[in-house]
């Protein structure tokens, strides 16, 4: 029993020392960025330091404008898709729940690559406008439309398939 209590105390001491070290690390990172660790998530601090290193004033301003909005906490980190989205949102420096997983991945990549226009495109929601089934032209859809002598962008894939089937029926009935 005494060994069990001593083992438990050793584990508890180690864990609290690890938490203090993690907190201390965030404090150091925040201090090196010239901000308070209480106002930013770890991901925001890392992004801020990267932006400062790259002398990217626009990214620095954006990240600083997010001060105090780091709403992702340990309690948000469950095992659901929502928590994965929350983790990605934290990495992207945005509030969780506003963007799809795909949008967050593109946003993180855009920020990593300093692609400000692509990041703005996602952040503004422009990527969600104007998307329709007829506007996406895959190689197969283009080939089917070409066989029918039509512009692939003017028709959905279902419409092209129906027209193709009608053409086959028409050719079969003529024979």
Image: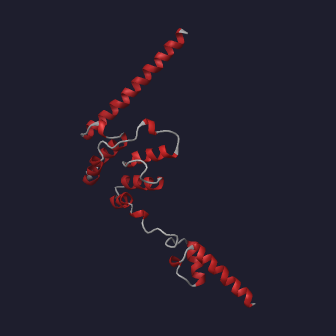
Residue lying at the far top in this picture: please name it.
Answer: 2
Q: Quadrant of the N terminus?
A: top right
Q: Quadrant of the C terminus?
A: bottom right
Residue lying at the far bottom in this picture: please name it.
Answer: 174
Left or right relative to 59: residue 136 = right
Residue lying at the far right in this picture: please name it.
Answer: 175
Above or below: residue 51 compared with residue 35: below
Above or below: residue 17 compared with residue 117: above
Q: How many marks?
A: 0
Q: Position of residue 125 (x, y in %)?
A: 39, 60
Q: Position of residue 138 (x, y in %)?
A: 54, 71
Left or right relative to 78: residue 71 = left
Tell me what residue is drawn at x 66 percent, y 82 percent: 166
Q: Position of residue 117 (x, y in %)?
A: 34, 61
Here the colouring is: secondary structure
Hey, which quadrant is residue 169 in on the image? bottom right
Instruction: Report the front residue among 97 and 175.
Output: 97
Q: Position of residue 133 (x, y in %)?
A: 52, 70
Tell me what residue is drawn at x 59 percent, y 77 percent: 160
Hey, which quadrant is residue 37 in on the image? top left
């Amino acid at each position: 029993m005494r060994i069990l209590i001593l083992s438990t105390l050793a584990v508890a001491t180690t864990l609290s020392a690890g938490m203090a070290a993690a907190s201390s690390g965030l404090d150091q990172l925040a201090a090196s960025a010239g901000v308070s660790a209480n106002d930013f998530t770890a991901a925001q601090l890392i992004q801020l330091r990267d932006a400062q290193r790259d002398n990217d004033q626009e990214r620095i301003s954006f990240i600083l404008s997010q001060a105090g909005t780091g709403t992702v906490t340990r309690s948000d980190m469950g095992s659901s898709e929502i928590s994965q989205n929350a983790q990605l949102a934290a990495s992207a420096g945005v509030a969780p729940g506003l963007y799809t997983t795909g949008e967050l991945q593109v946003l993180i990549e855009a920020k990593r690559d300093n692609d400000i226009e692509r990041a703005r495109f996602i952040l503004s929601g422009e990527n969600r406008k104007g998307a329709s089934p007829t506007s996406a032209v895959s190689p197969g859809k283009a080939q089917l439309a070409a066989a029918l002598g039509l512009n692939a962008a003017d028709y959905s894939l279902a419409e092209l398939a129906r027209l193709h089937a009608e053409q086959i029926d028409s050719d079969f009935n003529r024979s």
